[in-house]
């Protein structure tokens, strides 16, 4: 056979160029097939994340999300209800219930407190790291998966946010395991139904956490990989229908139950909180490049490795090319898809791109393991140094910051106003769910700006009303419209005193998150009003 005949011919059509560039130029290397688990790896993936996650869970809840996601399962536990999530006694239909169920179970086992609530996201983060190692080693090798799990462990943008009481840590676990299992199902030329079923179950749990976003983040990179890699297994319609059937089976019992009790849920959740949040800015309008600086900061120290990784992608050298397998290319594709999808979304929050961290770490982990970075003492030192920094922040910095920013950081200022259950307590103009959680007042009522006139009328017929002002200028604006038949009997400001240190003042802000002022409102007797009005 001649030398010319052994060279792959160049593609003759435009669609054929993409698979050619993918497999012959960008990711021509062979994947590492060493998957044997080492003892040192086991110790690292079990002990290092555990040391960073579990000892430091008892700090004050942060408004608004942590207060909300701690209070909802508390109310479900108090009512013994598994179907309808409620907040301040009213149905809360923004999200499905899986997170609430898990926190409710944690409350049952360990009591109602911040530590029990945050145990759920902490376990989710740890399970995600373990999945990256144990499942990721099948596609990029054991060393690459270990580096990926370590980079994920010390990524401040991931471990710092995902360990908070938010839905995104649980969603990231579901999406990561779904994509890992789905990739195993199609990675080789032989389709593996067992992995496909596992991917469907995990994706169904993601749907029960935050809706169809788990499927949106799974299928495009899988189908793109099948197109770009001619050796990947094709998924028949039979298995696509099976996947959909499993997702439906996981979700149907609760969706039927909630529809029977709250028929408006389907329109509210699927249309308003999925479709409209994607196509319209809602209340989180940000530019398309919003996530770029968040990734740069959130991936440290992984960004230090990302620079030579990008240089390697652009290099045509044989040594650099050998470090780039198609499996690593898939993980880059999966992470990039998550970032691109949320970048073009109308509504953006920093937590939305947490599912991008595990696949991007898998791509970087393979590069580290197969390049000179794997043998560099500085690389190992970098992991250790950042682990120490994150531990210090988790154990000291975050609890201090949470205490300063929590509405209940100085509980004596608030509890004296809300301890009497017969006193009506309202929040204006937003909820302040941390107050409800810490004081046991699950009957707080939210008053919106459009309802302020009716609230003023109602307050005239109550002996006393406590108002928790949640915005900086709400109290001053309220005083301007206060009628003569109502008076402020007591008032306290939660604004922080200056520490004389500019950096600290900027960090803690002017007020706690979600609560600025507390006011006691009382009616004035009619004769007093008449005397005040007389000349």
Image (cartoon, helix red, strand yellow):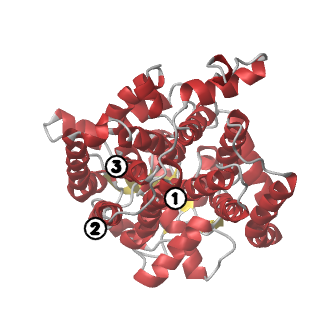
Residue 309 at x, y percent in the picture: 41, 30
User: For the residues carrying marks 1 and 2, which lies nearer the camera in this image?
Assistant: 1
Q: Which residue is mark 3?
A: 512
Q: Residues within 10 Å of mark 2 (few under 14, many from 20)?
A: few
Residue 335 at x, y percent in the picture: 54, 39
User: For the residues carrying marks 2 and 3, which lies nearer the camera in this image?
Assistant: 2
Let me know if residue 514 appears in the view: no
Residue at (73%, 48%) from the top-left corner?
Answer: 233
Q: Is residue 351 left or right of residue 380?
A: right
Residue 472 at x, y percent in the picture: 40, 41
Q: 255 above or below 4?
A: below
Mark found first going from the N terminus, 2 or 3: 2
The secondary structure type at the circle numbered 3 is loop
The CA distance from mark 1 to mark 2 is: 27 Å
The secondary structure type at the circle numbered 2 is loop
Q: Residues within 10 Å of mark 1 (few under 14, many from 20)?
A: some
Q: Which residue is mark 1?
A: 135
The secondary structure type at the circle numbered 1 is loop
Contact (CB < 8 A) between labels 2 and 3? no
Residue at (70%, 21%) from the top-left corner?
Answer: 17
User: For the residues carrying marks 1 and 3, which lies nearer the camera in this image?
Assistant: 1
Residue at (23%, 59%) from the top-left corner?
Answer: 395
Q: Which residue is mark 2?
A: 55
Q: Is residue 387 left or right of residue 4?
A: left
């Amino acid at each position: 056979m001649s030398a010319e005949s052994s060279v792959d011919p160049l593609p003759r059509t435009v669609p054929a160029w993409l698979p050619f560039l993918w497999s012959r130029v960008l990711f021509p290397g062979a994947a590492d097939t060493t998957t044997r688990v080492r003892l040192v790896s086991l110790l690292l993936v079990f002990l290092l994340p555990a040391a960073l996650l579990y000892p430091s869970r008892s700090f004050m809840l942060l408004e608004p999300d942590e207060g909300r996601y701690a209070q909802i399962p508390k109310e479900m536990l108090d009512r013994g209800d598994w179907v309808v999530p409620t907040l301040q006694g009213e149905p809360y239909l923004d999200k499905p219930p899986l997170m609430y169920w898990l926190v409710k179970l944690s409350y049952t086992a360990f009591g109602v407190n911040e530590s029990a609530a945050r145990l759920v996201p902490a376990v989710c983060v740890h399970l995600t790291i373990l999945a990256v190692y144990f499942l990721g080693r099948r596609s990029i090798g054991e060393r690459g998966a270990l580096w990926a799990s370590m980079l994920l462990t010390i990524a401040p943008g991931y471990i710092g946010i995902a360990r908070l009481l938010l839905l995104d840590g649980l969603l990231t676990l579901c999406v990561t395991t779904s994509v890992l299992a789905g990739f195993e199902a199609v990675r080789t030329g032989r389709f593996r139904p067992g992995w496909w079923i596992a991917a469907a179950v995990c994706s169904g749990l993601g749907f029960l956490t935050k809706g169809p976003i788990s499927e949106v983040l799974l299928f495009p990179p899988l189908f793109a990989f099948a197109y770009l890699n001619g050796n990947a297994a094709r998924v028949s319609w039979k298995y696509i229908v099976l996947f959909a059937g499993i997702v439906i089976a996981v979700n149907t019992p609760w969706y039927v139950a909630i529809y029977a009790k709250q028929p408006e849920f389907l329109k509210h959740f699927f249309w308003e909180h999925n479709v409209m949040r994607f196509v319209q800015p809602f209340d989180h309008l940000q530019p398309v490049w919003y996530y770029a600086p968040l990734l740069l900061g959130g991936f440290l120290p992984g960004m230090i490795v990302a620079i030579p990784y990008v240089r390697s992608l652009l290099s045509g050298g044989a040594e650099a090319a050998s470090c780039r397998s198609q499996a690593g290319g898939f993980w880059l594709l999966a992470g990039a898809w998550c970032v691109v999808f949320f970048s073009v979304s109308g509504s953006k929050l920093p937590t939305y791109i947490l599912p991008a961290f595990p696949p991007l770490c898998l791509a970087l982990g393979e590069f580290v393991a197969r390049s000179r970075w794997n043998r560099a003492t500085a690389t190992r030192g970098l992991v250790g140094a950042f682990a120490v920094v994150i531990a210090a922040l988790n154990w000291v910095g975050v609890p201090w910051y949470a205490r300063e920013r929590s509405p209940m950081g100085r509980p004596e200022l608030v509890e004296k106003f809300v301890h009497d259950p017969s006193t009506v307590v309202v929040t204006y103009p937003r909820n302040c769910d941390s107050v409800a959680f810490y004081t046991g007042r699950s009957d707080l009522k939210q008053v919106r700006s459009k309802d302020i006139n009716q609230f003023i009328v109602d307050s005239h017929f109550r002996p006393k009303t406590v108002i928790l002002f949640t915005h900086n200028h709400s109290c001053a604006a309220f005083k301007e419209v206060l009628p003569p038949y109502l008076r402020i009997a007591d008032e306290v400001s939660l604004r922080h005193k200056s520490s004389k240190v500019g950096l600290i003042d900027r960090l803690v802000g002017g007020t706690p998150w979600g609560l600025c002022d507390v006011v006691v409102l009382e009616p004035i007797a009619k004769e007093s009003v008449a005397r005040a009005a007389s000349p």
